[in-house]
Image (cartoon, rainbow, N blue to C red):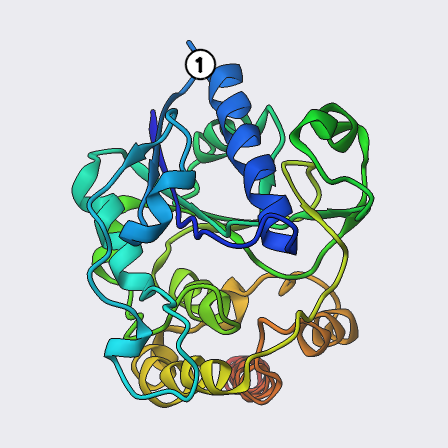
């Protein structure tokens, strides 16, 4: 089995949250690949803008520079060059023939057993994995503390920031102009995986990734957030709505009140959408019950 993992580095001030997290992310990925030697074939890639290349360690293959950003899609008051998600994933697809593609956010670090565990899960027949992180203390500031971070069990986090999927699925995904690094990018990927994967598994009970800090809703830059939300709600969701089966959603196996609570509290789910789908599912079940009763009455 071959896994190809891509990340999108960005040069930021060293003292910023991302400036602290990125070197730790880089090293944790290197360690995880080393740990998987002779077990899984892992390829590591980065794709970024020219001005970001200098921060990338040598153990990654740097793909050709990104040529556009969200700034090329529409006009914003701000000047941030958020990459277009499709460009990042397509760069990985074109660079590798790996069976499975992996995409993680830049502030997500890996446990050493990440790739070997992912391979074992995929061998069970899943074509897509959603892997939830653990949130650990903000006291950690340097790569030298990585062993302590591994030992910090942290707290579970409800959001989605690590995606593994069969390469063929990317050709089906409808991502429009969703940009990386802004809320709703995870919503778009999540719902595409639900729509197009045959067997999707949520991994929320294993310690495979971690993030420094436990916040659930990071601060929003409103205009970029609205861009991503509109891309999803106005362009993506109408195209995949008919493919979204509530039975494929994470937590759908839980009792009604528990799954509704999970969906409503999780920022990656749109409450009105899951309630609408839940209503349709209930309608199907009621129709089945009524048809069964009618059949028994007609055929005593």
Label 1: few (<14), some (14–19) or many (≥20) C-alpha neighbours in 10 Å? few
Q: Quadrant of the C terminus?
A: bottom right
Rendered position, 234 above or below 8 = below
Q: Position of residue 54 (x, y in %)?
A: 37, 40
User: Quick one: SS at disc 1?
Assistant: loop
Along the viewing direction, whichever of 174 and 273 lies nearer the viewer:
174
Q: Position of residue 13 (x, y in %)?
A: 56, 53
69 left or right of 218 in image = left
Residue 266 location, quadrant? bottom right
Q: Position of residue 245 (x, y in %)?
A: 46, 71
Rendered position, 101 above or below 112 = below
Along the viewing direction, whichever of 29 and 237 lies nearer the viewer:
29
Residue 38 location, quadrant? top left
Residue drawn at x 23%, y 66% is 68
150 left or right of 237 in image = right
Residue 171 location, quadrant? bottom left
Residue drawn at x 41%, y 72% is 80
Rendered position, 16 above or below 259 = above
Q: Which residue is mark 1?
A: 39
Tag count? 1
Residue pushed farthest top? Answer: 38
Q: Quadrant of the N terminus?
A: top left
Residue drawn at x 55%, y 29% is 27
Q: Position of residue 268 (x, y in %)?
A: 58, 71
């Amino acid at each position: 089995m071959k896994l190809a993992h891509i990340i999108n580095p960005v040069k930021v001030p060293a003292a910023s949250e991302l400036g602290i997290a990125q070197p730790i992310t880089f090293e944790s990925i290197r360690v995880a690949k080393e740990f998987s030697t002779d077990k899984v074939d892992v390829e590591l890639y980065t794709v970024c803008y020219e001005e970001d290349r200098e921060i990338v360690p040598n153990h990654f293959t740097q793909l050709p520079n990104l040529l556009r950003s969200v700034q090329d899609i529409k006009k914003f008051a701000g000047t941030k060059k958020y990459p277009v998600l499709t460009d990042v994933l397509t760069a990985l697809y074109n660079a590798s023939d790996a069976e499975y593609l992996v995409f993680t956010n830049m502030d997500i670090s890996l446990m050493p057993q990440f790739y070997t565990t992912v391979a074992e899960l995929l061998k069970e027949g899943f074509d897509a994995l959603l892997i939830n992180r653990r949130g650990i203390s903000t006291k950690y500031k340097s790569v030298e503390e990585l062993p302590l971070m591994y030992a910090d069990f942290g707290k579970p986090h409800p959001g989605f920031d690590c995606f593994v999927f069969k390469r063929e699925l990317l050709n089906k995904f409808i991502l429009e102009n969703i940009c990386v690094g802004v809320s709703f990018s995870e919503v778009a990927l999540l719902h595409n995986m639900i729509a197009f994967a045959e067997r999707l598994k949520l991994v929320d009970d294993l310690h495979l990734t971690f993030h420094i800090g436990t916040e659930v809703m990071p601060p929003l830059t409103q205009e970029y957030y609205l861009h991503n939300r509109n891309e999803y709600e106005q362009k993506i969701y109408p195209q995949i709505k008919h493919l979204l089966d509530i039975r494929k959603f994470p937590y759908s196996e839980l009792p009604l009140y528990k799954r509704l609570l999970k969906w409503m509290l999780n920022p990656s789910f749109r409450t009105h959408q899951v309630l609408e789908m839940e209503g349709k599912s209930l309608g199907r079940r009621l129709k089945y019950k009524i048809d069964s009763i009618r059949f028994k009455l007609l055929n005593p």
